[in-house]
Amino acid sequence: MKIRFLGATGTVTGSRYVVQHDGAKLLIDCGLFQGLKALRQKNWEAFSFDPSALDAVVLTHAHLDHSGYLPRLMREGFRGPIYCTPATRDLAAILLPDSAKLQEADAERANRHGYSKHKPAEPLYTSEEAEAVLKQFQPQPVHTPFTVGRLQIAFSPVGHILGAASIRIAGDGKTLTFSGDVGRSNDPLMQPPEPLSATDFLVLESTYGDRRHVADDA
């Protein structure tokens, strides 16, 4: 398997990873870059791959730094399935249209006050595009493998938010796991993350990997 790290590298936002194996080409997560202007400007850069050549997108969860670039991916030619858990699809149906409305409002404000160097300023994607990409979602139950080409893929709950899951990809006797954002073992609202199965390679989200959570009386 070959992996290309296109986001969440050198920063903690814009999660995007291309996985290629035996003719199949997947995009794991499709997140917005958020935060400082230098990061947000990355959202306007051309793709370093052909979106129309992707066989599928697989999402760990619905937060915009993991799913918020999907309408733009669709605009640039992606027409394949978007696999995720059912709860991730339900949350994306709220978050993606809301993200589009905010971007439309920002563009309208910039045009009204004339503070953008672009004439006219435009949103990264529109409400119509956010609604349209939802039709490509194909929710899959956790612990139930599905296939893309010769790859077998399965979700496993990791807490964090509703629907959040790790992604396990198996092919030709090797396994690759993307942890996604992992929740806490003692969260007062969410179920604890399930232990990961053995894997040959692990791509681990490590935003807070250099510290321990304080003990809270929940």
Image: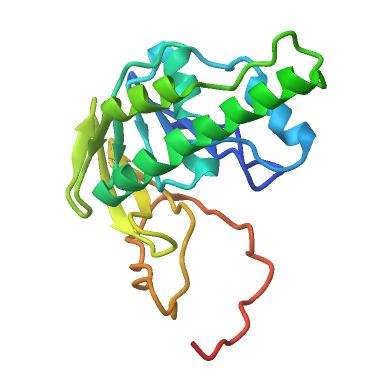
* Vertical position of residue 11 compared to residue 57: above or below: below
Kindly give the residue lying farthest to the bottom in the view shown. Answer: 217
* Vertical position of residue 141 compared to residue 29: above or below: below
Q: Residue at point 63% right, 83% down? A: 214
Tell me how the rendering is colored: rainbow
Q: Is residue 142 left or right of residue 16?
A: left
- Locate residue 1, reporting x and y percent: 42, 32
- Locate residue 157, reporting x and y percent: 32, 60
- Locate residue 163, reporting x and y percent: 33, 54
Question: Between residues 68 and 214, which one lies in front from this camera angle?
Answer: 68
Question: Between residues 61 and 201, which one lies in front from this camera angle?
Answer: 61
Kindly give the residue lying farthest to the top in the view shown. Answer: 119
Question: Between residues 19 and 65, which one lies in front from this camera angle?
Answer: 65
Q: How many marks?
A: 0
Q: Is residue 66 left or right of residue 6?
A: left
Task: Say whether residue 4 is visible.
Answer: no
Q: On the image, which quarter does residue 59 sit in?
A: top left
Q: Residue at point 24% right, 47% down? A: 86
* Vertical position of residue 170 compared to residue 108: above or below: below
Q: On the image, which quarter does residue 112 sit in?
A: top right
Task: Say whether residue 130 is visible.
Answer: yes
Q: Residue at point 63% right, 16% down? A: 122
Question: Between residues 67 and 104, which one lies in front from this camera angle?
Answer: 104
